Amino acid sequence: MLVFINVYNIIKNMKEFKDKVAVITGAANGIGYGIAEKFTKEGIKVVLADIESKALSEAEDKLKQINSNVLGILTDVAKIDDIKVLAKICIDKYGKVDILCNNAGVGFAGKSSTTIWESSLNDWKWTFDVNIWGVINGINVFVPIMLKQGTECFIINTASMASLITPAIGTSIYSITKFAVIAISESLKHELAFVDSKITYH
């Protein structure tokens, strides 16, 4: 999967894992947990962010068996104030952030045959809030912190194969949001290069 290729690229390009700090949203399960587990095994300090408290606690407990430097923070990525709190806790505890994984995402809210016009406005809002605003909020809060640090940093925004193909009926809203994540990410990559920052987008 592309996101794991990007994770391995970060690890390959990073000269030193000791004292590196990663923030991962949607980290309690799935891709987010997989990223967290890999980083933890490499000795990276990991801050887990997720909206599901029980799953988050379980993930934190599991990963602490590998590396004690794991911290779970209950976070709704759709809320900018939650992301600001996440950043503050991370900086207060570890003093910096080296890796940001904007990974939190939600899938298809309706049945498989639901068309765009049949999808409820609640489905649109829910999916956009998490899949697009979650990424925007992460960039808005963490990129200025990384720029101020002036050190080598990495960002991964999790997209999907659905961002590259014509969506099937029932997956339109999800695909639209992931198309947007690609556009956001490409813009971020070019703008970071334009200001000659040490932040790399993968």
Image (cartoon, grey):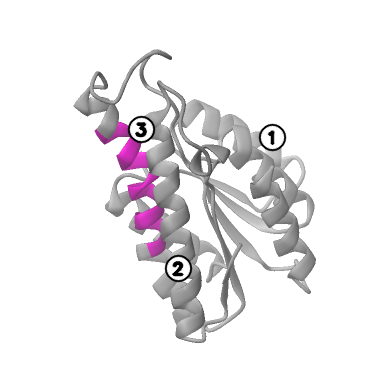
- Residue type, label 1: Lys
Q: Can you tell which of label 3 and label 2 is closer to the viewer?
A: 3
Disc 2 designates what residue?
188
Decide if residue 49 is in sight here: no
Provide the secondary structure element on which disc 3 rests.
helix
Prevailing secondary structure class for the magenta stretch in the rendered image: helix
Q: Position of residue 77 (x, y in %)?
A: 37, 45
Residues at badges 1 and 3 in contact (C-beta under 8 Å)? no
Disc 3 designates what residue?
173
Which quarter of the figure has residue 28? top right
Give the residue at x 54% y 28%. 55
Q: Quadrant of the N terminus?
A: top right
With 200 as the anchor, is 139 left or right in this view?
A: left
Disc 1 designates what residue?
62
Provide the secondary structure element on which disc 1 rests.
helix
Disc 3 residue crowd, few under 14, some 14–19, many 20+, Cα 10 Å: many
Q: Position of residue 32 (x, y in %)?
A: 59, 41
Provide the secondary structure element on which disc 2 rests.
helix
Give the residue at x 53% y 44%. 164
Decide if residue 8 is in sight here: yes
Which quarter of the figure has residue 109? top left
Query: What number is the disc on residue 92?
Result: none
With 46 as the anchor, is 121 left or right in this view?
A: left
> Disc 1 or 3, which lies upstream in sequence?
1
